[in-house]
Image (cartoon, rainbow, N blue to C red):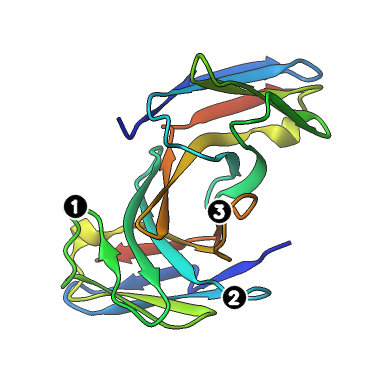
Amino acid sequence: GAVVSQHPSWVICKSGTSVKIECRSLDFQATTMFWYRQFPKQSLMLMATSNEGSKATYEQGVEKDKFLINHASLTLSTLTVTSAHPEDSSFYICSASPGGFWNQPQHFGDGTRLSIL
Amino acid sequence: QQQVKQSPQSLIVQKGGISIINCAYENTAFDYFPWYQQFPGKGPALLIAIRPDVSEKKEGRFTISFNKSAKQFSLHIMDSQPGDSATYFCAARFAQGGSEKLVFGKGTKLTVNP
């Protein structure tokens, strides 16, 4: 089955630092990758959609300068949380889609738990 | 309306019982309806999915029933096991401008008692 790998799985850092999270599709080429944020006991909230080689599309209310997304290849997308603050602490999950239509669902990584002290 | 309403919020079932989770939507532009299972600290894993031109899909103990006219779909877990205890999310996909989006329900926390 389609595998999406996310790294790191857990990161703790001081307020003001920047954190980079990687998302890789291991066995398929992902034309589109998605970044979600999930608060405890809540649903997934889409932050942005990235297509390989183009700028990411951010959802309303998501600060594009705070959450930098790069999708440089068909197997790798990165999310950088810049100048992170405690309110950025959350569970960040990426997903990838092989593209096309019908029977091409999004496959999710195992998430990154980000804790900002 | 880009919403998917999911119920119940939590569900407790005895081992061997049937777990039923319901979802409803308004937007007829949704074209694909996946269900995801999420364990604590993990990302959602695709469980089963259905297209709107199909009324039912079964994979092992998991069945999706889809009622297009009522704009409702449900997940049935037969012979529920303690290992099924997790949070389940229904979702609906729509395509927009060459891309796609998944809209998630709020989730159902399933507990299967031994």
Q: Residue B35: give its label.
A: none
Q: Chain of mark 1?
A: A
Q: Residue A29: give its label.
A: 2
- For label 3, the SS is loop
Position above or below: A27 against A94: below
- For label 1, the SS is loop
Residues at marks 3 and 2, CA–CA distance in whole angstroms: 22 Å
- For label 2, the SS is loop
Determine crowd level at label 1: few under 14, some 14-19, many 20+ residues with C-alpha closer than 10 A.
Answer: few
Residue A54: x %, y % from top left:
33, 78
Determine crowd level at label 2: few under 14, some 14-19, many 20+ residues with C-alpha closer than 10 A.
Answer: some
Q: Is residue B108 left or right of residue A64?
A: right
Position above or below: B34 against B97: above
Q: Amino acid at mark 3?
A: Lys
Q: Quadrant of residue A52?
A: bottom left
Residues at marks 3 and 1, CA–CA distance in whole angstroms: 26 Å
Residue A25: x %, y % from top left:
58, 73
Q: Are marks 3 and 2 on the same chain?
A: no
Q: Residue A60: give its label.
A: 1
Q: Which residue is disc 3 drawn over?
A: B42
Q: Amino acid at mark 1?
A: Gln
Task: Pick the quarter of the image with the N terminus of chain A.
Answer: bottom right
Position above or below: B62 against B39: above
Task: Pick the quarter of the image with the C terminus of chain A.
Answer: bottom left
Residue A47: x %, y % from top left:
30, 57
Q: Is residue B57 left or right of residue B100?
A: right
